[in-house]
Amino acid sequence: MSDRHRHLMEASDPDVGRAGGGAGSPDHPQDTKPSVKIDQIPVTIETKASAKDSGCHGGQETLRAAARAAGQSETLDQYARDYPAGPHDQPQSMCPAFGSLRVGLRMRRTATILSGSACCVYGLSFTSHFYGARRTVGYVPFDSETLVTGKLFEDIRESVYQVADPAVNDAVVVINLCVPTASGVPLRLLPKEINGVRIIGIDVPGFGVPTHAEAKDVLAGAMLRYARGEAEQGPVQAPRDGRKDKPTVTLMGEMFPADPVGIGAMLEPLGLAAGPVVPTREWRELYAALDCAVGAAIHPFYTSCVRELNEAGREVVGSAPVGYDGTAAWLEAIGEACGVARSAVDSAKNRFLPAIKGALSAAPIKGRITLSGYEGSELLVARLLIESGADVPYVGTACPRTRWSDPDREWLESKGVRIQFRASLEQDLAAIEEFGPDLAIGTTPVVQKAKEKGIPALYFTNLISARPLMGPAGAGSLAQIVNAALSNQARFDRMKAFFEGVGEGYTTGVWEKLPQEYPEFRERMRRQRQRVAGQNGPGEMS
């Protein structure tokens, strides 16, 4: 292994040794590699240099312009259609590429290779292992020379050949981060298959994909598209547990593990079964996801995945079986899409709706709650809180409004809830100031700000998403943790009283002489930064 690829290691996977996705020897002769000359790569040296010189800090407009000049307009235009950014540029969240990285790392027999700046790759790999990744993240480093000359693409291609071992992997995912995307590194020129191992190349730039939640859709959609092409050519691999004996409903969106089981129980009276959850956990599940009676956009931002199901001739319905009203409406929608008899739909509703109503009434929630997050399930959680008795005046989600979120949006708005799609941190914080909630549920900075104000708060991702939401199991599931947090107000009052008078911001602490602010110094530094920005040109630090 060359020094340039010293960071690229074979993936560690508990399924190593099982049959791969295609035939062929893991050994590949060097002369079998397709020849790709540098002059075939549609990127000029000038374009690459401009992207390299601006770097990650160059600003979104600079990188976006470089990417378009490098032939990436089609990709960026598709992302703009799939993931509209308004009303402002994009929410503040982690690097979007983490979503695609997470999807690949959670799949059996799938290797993932990143191409991007070293600092970005370090942060992404650290975050992936923080969230429990159990395999190596591949990395192809680059420098100014390899980026400008096109050698980076050759290095990526060589790395893919090293990893494309059918005894170990069914697929290899290559992800371009911001700088390689802006430089036009053409992953589309990679071989589509090596020794039976599928090669999936995607661009996931922070200036094109607004959130990491939507980046999950980028990779899941690309895999569904590849799998659909395979299925159209002939027989494909069956699911690990065999095909279901009933028509299935493909579920789109990462959920608490018990939720698909609960959904399956609710579908049984309809003569249906729960199909795979997309993003899937292994390649063969993609075929089963496409071979469904109907798709369910549990998380409504999986635009690319919806498109692939539609291309396969499958209808997709929105919302989810959450709470009493949500479950009733969802069963109706699924039944209508699948042509299920009215008597079967009524039977399912009669079996589960009374249980849901009983669970909700047995675990009431009393209090005003503001809710925000970036997972895509915020509207569903708000519905459940309201049916549990909570007053929810504001819901902020980093995800966009789509036609598949309309049923939840319309229901919430009928209850007087203000919904902010593509919510910024500032909007979420302003909601706390405006509504003075008894509990704030949100992202880390929202929780921090609420607690600074002496308001109990819960982190959405770790504490709310880690519970069932669907059907009878979801009804009442939030009450224990939410009511426990609401009961903590007295503790926050005591802490706030104890620390009263110690200041905040630069005056935090106990001082013999309180620090003074010097506005003239701030103004001088502001003018200096403006001069530096003018010298460096647009897009540089200001």
Image (spheres, rainbow, N blue to C red):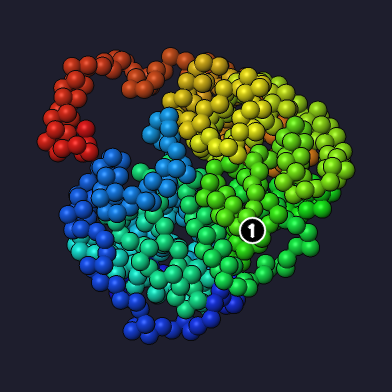
Residue 330 drawn above or below residue 224? above
Report the residue at 50% width, 83% height from top. Answer: 24
Q: Is residue 525 left or right of residue 371?
A: left
Q: Residue at x 43, y 50 (%)?
A: 97
Marks counted in the figure total 1
Instruction: Give the percent coordinates (x, y) of residue 237.
Output: 63, 71
Which image quarter: residue 388? Answer: top right
- Residue 2 visible in the picture: yes
Where is the C terminus found, in terms of image quarters? top left
The secondary structure type at the circle numbered 1 is: helix
The residue wearing badge 1 is 289
In the rendered image of this protein, does residue 208 appear above or below residue 479? Answer: below
Viewer-nearest residue: 48 or 526: 48
Crowd around label 1: few <14 · some 14–19 · many ≥20 (10 Å): many
In percent of width and height, residue 136 lies at 45, 64
Q: Residue at x 13, y 30 (%)?
A: 531
Q: Nearer the viewer, residue 407 or 467?
A: 407
Q: Is residue 364 left or right of residue 372?
A: right
Q: Determine whether 536 is above or below 236 in the image.
A: above
Residue 332: x %, y % from top left: 76, 39
Q: Residue at x 81, y 28 (%)?
A: 361
Q: Which image quarter: residue 509? A: top left
Which kind of residue does numbered mark 1 sit on? Answer: Ala
What percent of the width, then of the height, locates residue 393? 60, 20
Q: Is residue 190 left or right of residue 450?
A: left
- Quadrant holding the N terminus: bottom left
Q: Is residue 492 visible?
A: no
